Image (cartoon, helix red, strand yellow):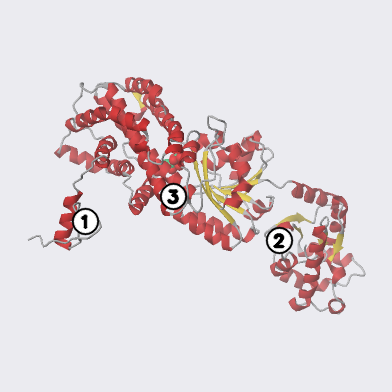
Amino acid sequence: MGVSGCGKSTIGKLLAQELNIPFFDGDDYHPESNIKKMSNGQALNDTDRQGWLKTLNDLAKKQLIKSGCVIACSSLKQKYRDTLSNDINNQTRWLYLAGSEEQIFNRLQKRSNHFMPAKLLQSQFDTLEEPKNAIQIDIKLSPKDIIKNIKSELMTTSDFGLFGLGVMGKSLCRNLANNGFKISMFNRHVDGIEENVAKDFKAQYTALNDAQAFDDISSFVNSLQQPRKIMLMVNAGKTIDYVIEDLLPYLSKNDILIDGGNSNYLKTKERGDYLKNKGIHFIGTGVSGGEEGALKGPSIMPSGDKVAYKEVAPFLEKIAAKDKNNLPCCTYVGPEGSGQFIKMVHNGVEYVEMQLLAEVSTILEQSGKNLDEVANTLESWKETTNSYLLEITIDILRKKEGDDYLVNKILDKAGNKGTGNWTTIASAELGVPSTLIASALFARYTSFNKEERVSNNENFRNTNNTTSDIVIDDVRDAYQFARIINHYQGFKLINEASTSFKWDLNLSEIARIWTNGCIIRSTLMEDLVNVFKETSNLLTSSKFIALLNQYKPSVKKVVAQCVLNDITAPCLGESIQFFNGITTANSSANMIQAQRDYFGAHTYKRIDDDDVKSHHTNWK
Ligand code: 6PG
């Protein structure tokens, strides 16, 4: 395509020859009336063009059934191109021969026997709506070079697109390239802030030699094989919606968008419905493992459009971490935003695991150990209760700056990006008591009140005595106890969501894809793969009943000592409190029911009748 005189016919013929497919000049298909009009120096209007464009569309469709073809047609407006590619949008490639008005005017002046007088050129440029989804070729080049460029553009379509080159996006690109995939990478251009990000990144790694780098959306999208597979690695939240809107004009029916950020699961469902209406498939996927995991193999939790998942599975499963049996830590999780839901719970569980390690490190330090000794103690726990977070905590404890421990120089205000908050909200909405996740989240919020903590400390000075009577093995067992409760609560929440939203999630598979690549990978998680094949409730597993009974005396002792010594340990404390609640046959909730009935006539059920009837008492 391109204005008259840009060289469409010449280039079209050469290209068709090169590709060994037929060539058709659109001008040969004009009805007599159009030719007459143009020869009289009159411009065609849209009605004149309509039938002609449909004829060319029919021609293209017929040729597609065979081997395809090259058609030369000015196609100046988007709506002409829409008619030309009607029903065959996915199989149409647009080549735009672009030149300046002056250049083309000079060319036309030199031509004889052409029914398009040069004076109509102005109207062509006025009409021209430059295409957003075309391979753009500069007509200054020689025909030979033009064909070479077109061929290389046509041949170099990538298998997979990565949109957003932040830390995770970059690592995933390298992972995909290391696994032999041909990728296109996009990062936006922001003057003075984000310039040539994709190109500079490509230049940094030889593994990215075959990758294509873009900061222009149209070229990025056009560089991808259809149906396109584009993974979005941008900030969760509104940005995802903006990016979707930016991409939509360039996408074709059946293209697939994958959101790999920590998006809210409800939003993922909304986005999936919205895109479905536009013929675009949407997959919301949790990705865990941080920068290193994304590079060497993350845990991937895709959900949503199951048919589309089949298309992207070869990519995601290849780059994912592998479990003990060499199976990918990536599986289709379930419908809607279920993948993002389980990633959210993963993060909630992660908050607790981190908090527990912070608590036990403090307790061990309070018992008189220096940080190297604390690290050595944790090192010895690897044998019974190893995890990625335990390993990194040991490294952190040992890290020194000069003679000082680095961790002691870090301001004690813990940040968060919101997933723990969402998990707590989801728990409340689903009626699941994920009390450890809430405790870990609120511990971060408490930490954030640094100034208030400092001033309160003046008024309510903590004794923080050195507690030499703390037994190290008790701390380890208390830690193991709390971790089991944490995992019980996390999977309970997932199971409840599965039932409520009719997702039919497989807890054992979820545990399996969390055995490697992700932040909460651990030996405990490996045990859970088998436990969840038998039951969806950890507290009914004979192995875990025995373990909790074994660890319970230790957690009681450790928590009691923390309370007596003014050591704050909210997650350890909550683990035994929750456990006592969930294992109490007759709770104090009868009193709550009586109080509700007293002041609000909310009624109550009785244990000495059928448990169904509602009763009300005049309590005075
Ligand atoms: C992961 C992490 C990752 C990220 C969290 C941190 O699984 O790779 O969970 O998603 O580190 O978003 O969350 P906070 O900033 O809320 O601690």
Horizontal side of 335 relative to 444 (left or right) equals right
User: How busy is the neighbourhood of tag 3: few (under 14 within 10 Å), some, or many (20 plus)?
Assistant: some
Q: Residue furthest front?
A: 609
Q: Check disc 3 and report the residue beneath it.
A: 498
- Residue type pointed to by label 3: Ser
Q: Is residue 65 visible?
A: yes
Q: Quadrant of ligand 1?
A: top left
Cα distance in 3D space between marks 2 and 1: 64 Å
Q: Between residues 461 and 552, which one lies in front from this camera angle?
A: 552
User: What residue is rendered at 45% in x and 44% in y?
Assistant: 343
* Between discs 1 and 3, the one toward the N terminus: 3
Residue 10, image quadrant: bottom right
Q: Check disc 2 and report the residue beneath it.
A: 89
Q: Is residue 418 visible?
A: no
Cβ–Cβ under 8 Å for marks 2 and 3: no
Q: Residue 408 appears at what percent x and percent y?
A: 32, 29
Q: Between residues 442 and 169, which one lies in front from this camera angle?
A: 442
Residue 539 to residue 132: above or below: above
